Amino acid sequence: MKCILKFSILFLTILIVGCNNIQHVTKGQKTEPVFPKGDKITNNNFTGTAWLQMFVNNDSTYNTSIGNVTFEPRARTKWHKHPGGQILLVTDGKGYYQEKGKPAQVLHKGDIVKIPPDTEHWQGAAPDSGLTHIAISTNLQKGNVVWLTAVSEDEYGIATK
């Protein structure tokens, strides 16, 4: 029960702060986002340019990892799945989330996506907009992300029409 309470507090804190991860306009001037963009992702699990800023790395207490992912326009993940599920908190921009065999869903700032365990999916930015989301990978004792094939240009084009 104590672990659940700690995780709930951590989750709510990140949710509140994450929702403020937008650029506010004050008297015509933009301020910096709350969280840094992080490091450019250089592995082959993404198409296009994306950045990752890790907030929480997995450990035996929380069994979760939490990171801020920023996609440039048209950038996206490969098809992949999470054995323990995942939650996405969209904090800026416009993008798409698609489960295998289903139509893509449009994502906007403020959207929350709860991805069931072992659900094959991808997410990424719209053709004309970047996308930033907080990715929470849950129940990591069940295993790490399983990367699959790239989202083809045809798949992306159909999803974003």
Image (cartoon, helix red, strand yellow):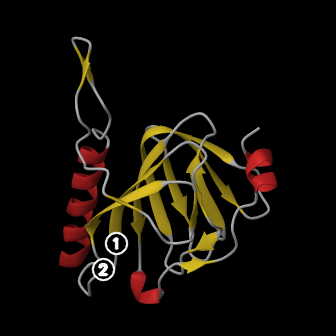
Residue in front for this viewpoint, 98 or 3: 98
The relative height of residue 3 versus residue 155 in the rendered view (above or below) is: below
Kind of element beneath mark 1: strand
The relative height of residue 33 versus residue 122 in the rendered view (above or below) is: above
Q: Which residue ends up furthest to the top in the rendered image?
A: 27
Looking at the image, which residue is at 47% across and 83% down? Answer: 144
Quarter of the picture containing the C terminus is top right
- Residue 156: % across, % down: 73, 51
Q: Quadrant of residue 40?
A: bottom left
Residue in front for this viewpoint, 49 or 111: 49
User: Which residue corresponds to mark 1?
Assistant: 65
Kind of element beneath mark 2: loop
Looking at the image, which residue is at 54% across and 76% down? Answer: 82
The relative height of residue 143 versus residue 23 in the rendered view (above or below) is: below
Q: Quadrant of residue 57?
A: bottom left
User: In the shown orientation, is residue 161 left or right of residue 32?
Assistant: right
Label 1 packing within 10 angstroms: few (<14), some (14-19), many (20+) = some
Residue in front for this viewpoint, 9 or 126: 126
User: Which residue corresponds to mark 2?
Assistant: 58
Mark 2: which amino acid? Asn
